Image (tube, rainbow, N blue to C red):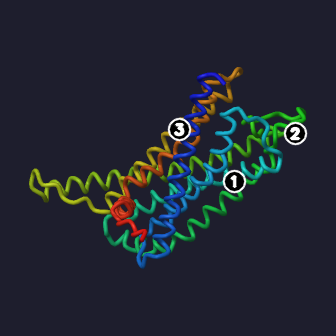
Amino acid sequence: MNSTEFSFGMVILLQFGLGLLVNVFLLLFYIRVVSISHKPSHSDLILAQLALANTIILLTSGVLETLSAWGLKNFLDDVGCKILMYLYRVARGLAICTTCLLSMFQAVTISPSTFRWAGIKAKLPKCILPSCALSWVINLLIELNAPIYMRSPQNNSGNVQTILDLKYCIKVIESAETNFAITVMLSFRDLFFVGLMSAASSYMVFVLYRHHQQVQHLHEPGHFPRVMPEVRAAKRVIALVSLYVLLYGRQTIMLSILVNMKEKSPLLVKSHLVFQLTFSTVSSFLIIHSDRRIRTFWTRQSTAPNPDPS
């Protein structure tokens, strides 16, 4: 292993380790909040699902990419490859849907309390659980192609075209028409939800700008009003969506370049793989930074008196 491979291996290992640790903590934290709180925030369930999706991504793709980066080859059989790649693809789609759901929920929450929005706001809490369940159903069905066409490199007969080579798994499809149909279906899902979350975030930026202008007129210069929880939550969601859109755009462009390159650059391939785990890792730190309850929880834990051993 040369210095470049070692560096990429360390970056992937660091992303995997930190991301898994923080997302498991977030998942347990929000499950606890939802289970014991009399009036939990309606976004807690969405954030718990996002943490779960990120955890699955890191436990599947994260583990596989880490092992592959450190030189392990052909360590999966067909069954393991199909199961792990199916779980990864479902979790990836779930992360898209959940981020979109979070952005739309927050956009409605901070919208003006007019007659037009009043009915939507009243019905919104009842729609969260069904929407989360629907996102699971959509992705479990739309990603059924993964266990059908993914296989271990050990069982590649060479008689079919390899569409995607991940070193530990390969995707083979005999028909170009089938591959085109699957690509269009997955691209439509991704672009649809990315478009919705982008529109919701743009609306939130507009609402926050108007709110900022109103606050400036109501308060004296030099006095900074307390930021409302809804505004903090909206800023968190805008940051999450911006991060996802930027990474999704980069990943799409890079994948298009790699697919059309006759001789793939190892450096570009490794760079592309490194960014696969970035959203799952960085988004968890954004959530922690923006949620005061988590900071309060850590403060209480750090200041709690140690039990007397005697």
Q: Is residue 110 visible?
A: no
Q: Nearer the viewer, mark 2 or mark 3?
A: 2
Residue bearing the label numbered 3 = 249
Instruction: Give the label, 3 or 1, closer to the camera.
Output: 1
Residue type at mark 2: give it.
Asn
> Quadrant of the image for the C terminus?
bottom left
Point out residue 267 in the picture as x, y percentages from the top left corner: 61, 24
Question: Which residue in the structure is indicated by mark 1?
Answer: 87
Front-most of residues 141 and 43: 43
For marks 3 and 1, give the CA distance.
Answer: 23 Å
The residue lying toward the viewer, choosing from 110 and 72, is 72
Type of amino acid under label 1 = Leu
Q: Residues within 10 Å of mark 3 (few under 14, many from 20)?
A: few
| Element carrying mark 2 | helix
* x and y percentages locating residue 67 in the rendered image: 68, 39
Q: Picture coordinates of residue 117 (x, y %)?
A: 37, 69
Q: Quadrant of the N terminus?
A: top right
Location of residue 27 with respect to 77 vertically, above or below? below
Residue at the location (21% across, 60% down)? 226
